[in-house]
Every structure is written in structure tokens, then in C-alpha cells.
Image (cartoon, rainbow, N blue to C red):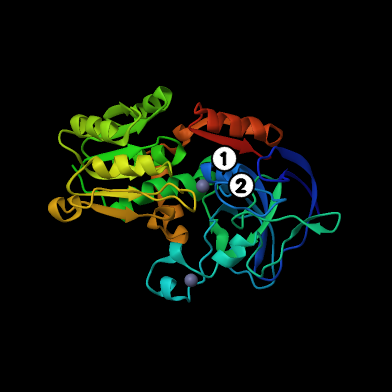
Amino acid sequence: MKIRAAVLEQVGGPHHVVELDLAEPKEDEVLVRLQASGVCHSDQNAIDGTAPTRCPAVLGHEGAGIVEAVGSRVRRVRPGDHVALSWAPSCGECEECLRGLRQLCGAAWPAMGAGALMDGTTRLSRSGDPVHHYSFISSFAEAAVVPERSCVPIPRDVPFAVAALVGCAVTTGAGAVWRTAGVQPGERVAVVGCGGVGLSAVLGAVAAGAGEIVAVDRVPSKLEAARDLGATRAVLWTGTPEATAEAVIEASGGGVDYAIEATGRPEAMTAAFLSTRARGAAVLIGIPREDAVVQLPALSFPRKERRVLGSLYGSSYPERDFPHLLDLYRRGRLPLDRLISHRLPLDEIDMAFGLLTGGEATRVVLELA
Ligand SMILES: [Zn+2]
Ligand SMILES: [Zn+2]
């Protein structure tokens, strides 16, 4: 079939919205008519080369839509089902999956790196030449063929824009607070970087009953957004990790139990670590450059029992956690729609990334139908 999609021809951009060919789903794949896609910093990392990405490619990994057709062996969903899409289809059989660490499943990484689906080939093409997928989803398009394991059925009354955000930012941010950190009621939390992921961490901290929630960002409007969503204190990034951490320690009344870092910048990771109190932990979510290195004061590991925790996809399991997150949204416990600052059509995709990199946007959603 023919679809309209935003193609990144080469690193550096821009996008071109063009017509592509989308092949039928294979036996364990699903054709999804996309309705909404969030625009995430990881897409920006692909555009600017921070994360090496095969081009030409259709980016987008935070999508939701309606199942249109399924392969012969698909059992999880049927045509007509509403789905949120996971960019981490786990195999259920490898060592990590058997240890309960589905987000760390190794089976999907080679195909993801090749810009293909699980069998190493693409369903996207143009004049017979392959166009690469991105994180199995490629949601900057009218439709996508995705692995069955990327499809998580959702209730019909959930707006697609909200379901799309659950596909990456919300699960990553709230999951880091709940599942990686395991924040307890009354514990103090800092969130360094208040984009879509960081603000999701703020919402997660509020829902977990955290005490002080200190938002940190270099953009005042994002701090305001964080306060609107429940952050109790705001700290403007001062330019150095040390001074910023001092301000967080002051604002939190002596340092935080968990400092969630959602930018991927080493200096922000350092600030997060230095913001913790004794036994506290920096929780690192942001995706850094491949060659990034963080320097930390080693003495405070033993002397203060400070810790560093890595977190991928909020240490979550999409099949279990997407429905839970959306249930909390439906009951008004997690106001996920308030994360969305802008809604744009697919044709305005470069403007969407301008809003993201310019710091004005919390989350931009592309409306695809
Ligand atoms: Zn993302
Ligand atoms: Zn696995």
C-alpha cells in the first residue's frame, strides 16, 4: 500500500513528507493505522547524529493507532483494536526475559540497530529501495507495520495522543520513579530535565506520594510546567553541576533520596548524583552520546552510600504497565493529557522538532488521522 510518511534522508535532516510503499505484514507482524505520535528527544538524537541511525529512515517511536490487518500467526490483537506501541518487543525466552527484565531483552537490539523489523528486513520502501524503520515503530507516518510484540491493546475511550505518550515518555519517566527507584511516600525526589520524560517522572513522583519534588531545568517555562504538574520546588540550572546540586540540596531540605536525570548530558548526571543525600541514588534515564563519560566523587560511594541506578524504559514491561498507566489516567490519578503542549499535522514535523530543541515544548504530538 501507499502511505505518506516523513523521511529523514540523512543525518542532520530536514524531513521530507513523501509517499512510500508499505508492504503487507508478515506472519508475526501487524499493520497499524497510526493516529498520533509523540516527538521524543531520542528522535532528535537520531536527527543530529547523537545516536547513529540508518538513513533514509522514518523516525518516531511513540505511537498509537488502530489495527488494520494482522499476520497469520498473530493472536494478541485483531483488526479494529486500539493499540499503544512499544519500541521494546521482548522475546520472552532469553536470559534477561527469564530474569524478568523484559526491557533489557537482547533479541531486539540487532534488528533495531539495522533499522529493520525483527527478521532483519524492512517493510518500508521507495521505488524498490528499502527505507529503514526506527525502533520498530516508525510512527511519523500514516501507517506502520510493527512486530506483534510491539502492540499493546488499550481501552477505546483513551485518546490516541495520550496512548502514544505512554509508548515512551510516560513509561520511561513514571517507571523510573516507581520501578527503578521504587520511591516511597514522603521520599524526596529531584527531576533534572523537564521535557516529556522528566515531567512524566514528576507525575510519577506525585502519584507515589513523594515529599519534596524539585524540578530542575535551564528553561523557566519548563519549570513552570513542572510546578503545574505537582513539583513543589523549582531550580533553574545555574551552569555548573556543583552549584545546581547545591540549589537542589537547599530546596529539598538536605538533598534528595532520588535524583532522576532525563537529559542524557554528563553534567546533568553529575548534578543529579551530587543532589542526593546519604543512601540516595541518581537514576539515569537520559540517553547520552555513545562516547560520553561521567566523573563522580568516588569517596561518597562508601562514605555516604550514594548510588547510581540505570533505567531503560522505566524498568517496565509494556504489556503489564501500559494498561496500568492508562487506567490511572482514566481515573484521573495521572493527568497525562497535560503533558501535551502542542499538536501539529505530519507536514509540520520540522516545526515540531524546532519546538522541541528550542525548549518551548513539553511534548509535541503529531496528529496523523
Ligand atoms: Zn522516546
Ligand atoms: Zn528476551
Q: Amino acid at mark 2?
A: Gly
First reached walking from the N terminus: tag 2 or tag 1? 1
Residue 135: % across, % down? 59, 56
**Label annotation for residue 60:** 2
Q: Nearer the viewer, residue 112 or 337?
A: 112
Q: Are there few (<14), some (14-19), or many (20+) residues within 10 Å of tag 1?
A: many
Q: Nearer the viewer, residue 360 or 97?
A: 360
213 relative position to 193: left or right: left
Q: Quadrant of the C terminus?
A: top right
- Residue 104 picture quarter: bottom left
**Label annotation for residue 10:** none
Residue 350: % across, % down? 66, 33
58 relative position to 336: left or right: right
**Label annotation for residue 39:** 1
Q: Amino acid at mark 1?
A: Val
Is residue 48 among the parts visible in the rendering? yes
- Where disc 1 sits, the SS reads strand
- Vertical placement of residue 320 versus 173, above or below: below
x 33%, y 38%: residue: 191
Q: What is the C-alpha distance between the residues marked 2 and 1? A: 7 Å
- For ligand 1, tell me if the residue under mark 1 lies within 8 Å: no
x 45%, y 36%: residue: 195
Q: Quadrant of the N terminus?
A: bottom right
Q: Are there few (<14), some (14-19), or many (20+) residues within 10 Å of tag 2?
A: many
- For ligand 1, tell me if the residue under mark 2 lies within 8 Å: no
Q: Nearer the viewer, residue 343 or 18?
A: 18
- Residue 31 picture quarter: bottom right
User: Farthest left residue?
Assistant: 303
x 72%, y 50%: residue: 56
Q: Are marks 2 and 1 in contact (CB under 8 Å)?
A: yes
Residue 140: % across, % down? 66, 44
